[in-house]
Image (tube, grey):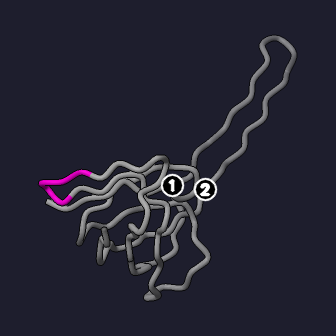
Amino acid sequence: MKFAIISTGGKQYKATEGATLRVEKLDAKPNTKVTFDKVQLVSDGQVNKLGDPLVKGASVTATVAGQMKAKKVMVVKFHNKVRYRRTRGHRQNYTTVKIDKITI
């Protein structure tokens, strides 16, 4: 089974061909191709290539499926006995990508 560990948006993701990933928001329109060049590890089932810190020549090609927002997270601040309460909501933007090809 072929897979790769990629970095995007300050996070690392395990990408396999045909998989769908939710990554941090990318500036790309739906149905466009995106290439991830920051590949830290590539495996084809037999041989593992580990980068130092990146694998040279390796890339992952994906198709953008859509731009979405996550569920709302409520942030509450509270100080006891001083009538201090603050409530705030946050919805994180993310991009859904479908992994097409892993190039070693």
Most foreground residue, 99 or 67: 99
Give how far apart the Cα atoms at labels 2 and 1 are.
6 Å
Amino acid at circle 2 = Arg
x then y, percent, for residue 26: 57, 71
Q: From the image, tell me which residue sits under label 1.
A: 71
Q: Amino acid at mark 1?
A: Lys
Work out which residue is located at the far bottom of the displayed protein and give it.
Answer: 31
For residue 94, above or below residue 30: above
Mark 1 element type = loop
Instruction: Give the crowd class for mark 2: few <14, some 14-19, many >=20 residues within 10 Å.
Output: few
Picture mark count: 2
For the N terminus, the quadrant is bottom left
Residue at the spot 13% in from the left edge and 55% down from the top edge:
45
Tell me which corner region of the image, top left, top right, bottom left or bottom right, holds residue 65: bottom left
Q: Is residue 69 left or right of residue 5?
A: right
Quadrant of the snapshot with the C terminus: bottom left
Query: Where residue 42 is drawn, which disc sits there?
Result: none
Above or below, 54 relative to 83: below
Q: Which residues are magenta?
A: 44-48
